[in-house]
Amino acid sequence: MRFLFLVFIVAIGHFSFANAQDNASRAQTFTAEGVTIEFSAKPTRPNTTQVVAGEEATLGFRIRGSNGGVPLTNLRPVAWLDQHQKPGAIEMRECREKVHAFLQPSFSSRPTIDLNSYFVLALNNEANISVIDPLAGFGGSKLYTLIPLKTPGEDWVLSANNKRLYVSMPQSGQVAVVDIPTWSVIANVDAGAMPTRITLQHDEKYLWVGNDSAEGGITVIDTTTNKVAAQLKTGAGHHEIAFSDDDSFAFVTNKDSGTLSVIDVRKLAVSKEINVGSQPVALAYSSLSQTAYVANEADGTIAAVSGSKHEIVARIQTEPGVSSVRIPAAGHYGFALNTRKNTLYAFDLSSNRVVQTVPVGPGSDQLSFTKQFAYVRSTGSEFVTMINIGDIGKEAPVSTFPAGQRAPAESLSRSHAAAIVPAPEEGAVLVANPADKMIYYYTEGMAAPMGSFQNYKRDPRALLVLDNSLRETERGVYSTTVRLNTPGRYYVAFLLDSPRLINCFEITVADNPNAAAPVETAIRVEPLSHAVARAGETFSLRFKVMDAKTRAVKAQLNDLSVLVFLAPGIWQQRVVAKPAGDGVYETSFVPPSAGVYYVFFQSAQLGVQYNQSTPLTIQAIKP
């Protein structure tokens, strides 16, 4: 979840509402300050025009200049969706007040859905994918949905617009195509024998799949038709795949053949085979040096292959056992892991020389990056190693943190896909530990993870983060997908920072006759404490509990428990509230860090569960 504290000026402009009953298919427009914003809400289910409760819908904002209609790109709009209780359209004054309230963490002014959140996807050892909502599902089950696969997945890749997820399934010889808006598999494409590594070229025209069979080769799938465009013979063994920046050429390693295949993407034909070394097992392409780097496990060399001349221009000597090579975006250094020696090599992309050797944990096999750090996953230890990228070349300091209780190698579940991925919040990562059956959330600068997510007795072998906030899905169009479980009228509070504009659009959600009846909230909780706490200090929380309908106070509840968690669900604590008379209760907790905390309530005496109560919100600030 992202929290924005902005000073804003509201531009009053022209706004036109579509008919409330037909607003799923007709756009609503708002014009001010030379900018036109066109809003639409469309159901994701095919052949439908109305947004229905319990089903997903795509919310989109088309933003363009009023003069000439030029799309405005690279913007950072934010939005919230809240139920509208009053008759008629929401007034501009009320809209401004709502946006201001949503920007400031408070006890009561929270939207129905915050459109600035994300999902965590876990590739499991079973034939399925867990979709976890770190925030909205807290207090009940965080498992948003489970995507069934034909057979267990090995590797995956997400399209840039977050609409398609492709998953290789070696046991069935297929690639599953998952439609993200509906969380369903829409195709299982035959992809040759033992499809393993899978990647999209930059323009996403083709999906490339490595076939780790005895014959060896590559299957190329057209992403428009989900049909095989070509099956190419390269060499034998495991394959890694990379592309030149302009997608003119694909580079494919062939482990058992000791070669690198250069493929002409336009012709979909192998143009050259290069003998790169003994057992090439890893591959990365540098945009800075326009060079492909191939790590050879048996002889310990890293072959630097020119992206234009397609010939070896340098060999970087490491040690036998090198098994992974990665290059961070816009980085000046490449990194290679040696699983046998428990060593990380950092090499300069301009000189093609090793500049630093760093000891890492036992069985280190994967590298991931944030802007500041390189993260190394060790299968033989629960500890993750961190190296400050900015200090490479001058004895970069090394630190570690425990990502769980057990070493990942204690689980037989492995995947070629990444087990450590950056979180949407800058300076944070998510770590999958299949032995613990847990996902850990770590923030840079901490000695240990701030919290964890259950994977419900499944081994999470790899992770993906699906950012559900407004994203530019095409030029000037910013959209996201939501699910509204309650029918009624809603408004979408929209804020654009530059130029600073605020407006509220409207959608109507129809009743779903097939949906289960919603569980009514039995109690109403009113805060009696100030909504601001200090991190590291005891915060006393006082509140009154009443019947949601009659407003009669609920006194002497001896089983009233309180769940407090730090958004987006990375720390939690359960405490018991003590009666203070006349329906008033009090408890306390110590927020471990600055941030926004949500407070849920549960009482077996009243039949109220955590996920049936409306949460309070507390902001913790640095002391």
Image (cartoon, grey):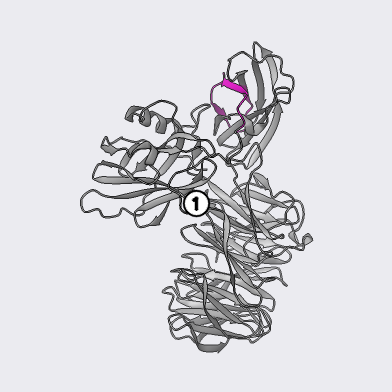
483 up-or-down from 9: above or below: below
Q: Residue 366 falls in which quadrant of the image?
A: bottom right
Mark 1 — residue?
45
Is 165 positioned to the left or the right of 473 in the image? right
Point 68% across, 84% down: residue: 214
Residue 505 percent coordinates (x, y): 37, 38
Q: Amino acid at mark 1?
A: Arg
Is residue 469 visible in the rendered image? The answer is: no
616 up-or-down from 571: above or below: above
Is 52 positioned to the left or the right of 360 in the image? left
308 up-or-down from 481: above or below: below
From the viewer's side, name the closer residue of 581 and 218: 218
Residue 566 highlighted magenta (yes or no)? no
Point 77% across, 63% down: residue: 412
Residue 274 percent coordinates (x, y): 55, 88
Residue 417 percent coordinates (x, y): 62, 64
Position of the C terminus by quadrant: top right
> Regarding mark 1 in the picture, which secondary structure is present there?
loop
Are there few (<14), some (14-19), or many (20+) residues within 10 Å of tag 1? some
From the viewer's side, name the closer residue of 359 and 462: 462
Q: Which residues are magenta?
A: 519-541
Is residue 157 visible in the rendered image? The answer is: yes
